[in-house]
Structures are given as structure tokens and as C-alpha cells.
Image (cartoon, rainbow, N blue to C red):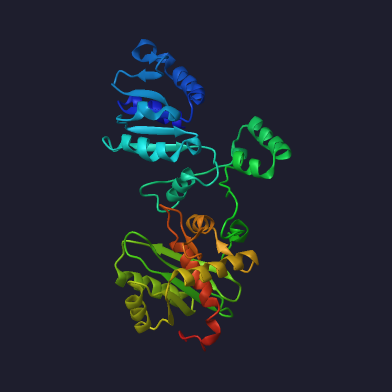
Amino acid sequence: MAGVYALTAADLGGAVAWVVPVYKNARAPWRFAEAAVSPAGSRVRVNRTERVIEFPSGGRLSVYSADNDVALRGEAFDVVIVDEAARVSEETYSDVLMPTLADRKGTMLLISTPHGRNWFWREWIRGQSDGKEAASWTAPTSANPMPTIQRAALQAQQVLSERTYRQEWLAEFLADGGSVIRFVDEAVRNDMPDAPDRQHTYVAGIDWALSVDYTVCTVVDATSGACVAQDRFNGVEYAMQRERIAAMCRYWDVRVVTAEQNAMGKPNNDELRRMGLPVRDFTTSNSTKADMIEALAAAFEHRAITIPNKPQLIAELQALEATRTANGSVRYAAPDGMHDDCAISLALAWVATGQRVEYGPNIWR
């Protein structure tokens, strides 16, 4: 797919770079490209020494090696394809490859087998967000319709370690160990209810934001421990945010709302209370956030919580990191460049499950 895309872009006059981790990795894509243009004969110029194909339109496809990225500096491309991107260093990606797209407002395709949770994983997560600036997909090798590939995948499952098989054949991003919240995948359910059960009690958690981060409202069934709904949005004025949140809470008959009151949170919480929502302020500090995250982690450990199959929520839960501060306390946060709004909103809702007994009859009746 990437090879066809690269050749088409070059044939139409685009400057295309195919980047591989080390030079030997270039053999397969170069053979593919050379074979694809061979019917064109003398209409295209093929330089095997430099591994460059030039088209009559003025476009070109060039193969580069990431371990010798000096040749890429100062170039400008319409398309950059990074092959086995997870094996390319983050510095080459951010400091060398990204700038080559600036002049031409170019496009980058990252294709790779996963390799832990490095920068490639973070970019994949970004692509799962809203699809505006980036989009991402994953598929296991076993999904390949070729019988020979399916047989190979079955044989690999029988002889490889579970970890190797999951990464290399199922294309799963595996943690390197020490994840803050474990058993996230096991908690995912595809059959979450889409309407409230009048015999159950529902609570919510709100993490406020306006433009850079996201406001997220999460509803949890405190009776069953199921996260039944989550709304995530940014760039929306607070008045509209409050209306959306109020509608969501009323639909689910929410008894308690735990909402962050830092910064813009307090005035928004006050407005929600004026609208009739049972909002409880939550002051987020390093200490209270740690308690909140650890309580959520314990819920996953004890299989007390289930979550919907929402890629952004799953990714944020799996990505949470713990670092030790100078005073010896633990700080929980998303990796640089990622968000944790969905995870925090869920944690706030989980806090509310412990507060529900303090409220009386359903306020919406």
C-alpha cells in the first residue's frame, strides 16, 4: 500500500522519501519500486547507486537510511514514508524527518511492527484521537487472507513466546513492565448498555479544559462498576460544555458528580449546581491525584471495573506513568505529548462511586 502510494505521488510530480532504519532494510522496498517502474522503460530514470527513481513529471522517489540521517537534512518532501518506524530513533523522527515536510506541507506515513511503547506508539495513540491531524490503524498478521500467511501465523503461535507473538504477529503495543494501571485490556467490554437501569445508581466525573486539553465527562454505574458513557470535547465554549454535561447526567440519572475545581473548574461547577446537578468539588493536587489514580488502579487489579471499547480511554489508561518527585512522593501523569483527560475523568467518577451513599432519592424524580 505504501509503495503504491509513494510511486503514485512521485509519478504525479511529488518529492517522495522512503526512510528505513538501516541501509540493508531498503532492499525490499527498492526491489518493489524498481519492478513497478520497469514497464515504463526509458520514461523513468533509475539510479541504482543512489537508489533514486526520477519521473517525467519531475517527481522522484528516493530511499534513505535513518542511521545516516545527514543526507535528509535540508531536504523538502511532499511525502515521507518511514518503514519499520518503531526502530527509527525519536531524534531522527522529530529533529530530521518532521522538518522536511514544512516547506511543502507534506504528509508522513509511519508503517511498522510495534516495538514497545516508544514515540511510534505515542503517534499511533495520537492517531486514535479525532482523526483531524493524524489517523492510525492496526491489524494482526493473521488477518491476511493469504493461506500461507495464515498457516505461518498459526505455526508462530505454537513456537514463539506469548510476548513475541503478540508483538510481532498480532501487532500489539506491549508495555515494558511496571504499568501504573494493569489489566486494562481484560476490563474492556463491547456490550455496554446504552440506557440506564432504574435499579442501578449512576455517578459521574468531570475533568475540565477549553482548548489545548479536553473536557471529559464520564458516567459510571456504581452498582455494577461499569463505565457506561464518556463524552470528550475541546474548543467548545463553557456554556455549551455545561449543557452537554447536564444532558448526559440527566439521561443517566446521575446521583453524584465529582468535578475538578482547579482553575476554571470552580465557576463551572457552580453553574452546574445552579442547573440542578449534584456536583462535588475535587481539588486536584499531586497528593489527591495520586490517591485517585491508585484507587482506580486497585479497581482494575480487583476486576471491580469494566470500560467500553474506546481506544483513547484505553490508551490513556495504559500510558499513565509514575515518576518520583524530589520530596519522595509519586507523580502520575501522561507521557510528554499525550493527554490523560479520559483517564482522569474516569478516576474522578470512580471517586464518586464511594460518595453515592451520601445522597438521598434520585434528584431527577
Q: Nearer the viewer, residue 207 or 11?
A: 207
Q: Residue at x 32, y 34 (%)?
A: 100
Q: Quadrant of residue 102?
A: top left
Instruction: Decide if residue 257 is on the left or right side of residue 266.
Output: right
Q: Is residue 193 visible?
A: no
Instruction: Decide if residue 202 is on the left or right side of residue 156.
Output: left
Q: Residue furthest right?
A: 158
Position of 294 relative to 34 (above/below): below
Q: Position of residue 105 (x, y in %)?
A: 29, 38
Q: Position of residue 288 (x, y in %)?
A: 48, 72
Q: Quadrant of residue 296?
A: bottom right
Q: Residue at x 47, y 43 (%)?
A: 120
Instruction: Decide if residue 289 is on the left or right side of residue 268.
Output: right
Q: Is residue 356 visible?
A: yes
Q: Quadrant of residue 281?
A: bottom left
Position of 236 relative to 359 (above/below): above
Q: Residue furthest front?
A: 327
Q: Position of residue 11 (x, y in %)?
A: 34, 24
Q: Position of residue 146 (x, y in %)?
A: 62, 32
Q: Residue at x 63, y 69 (%)?
A: 304
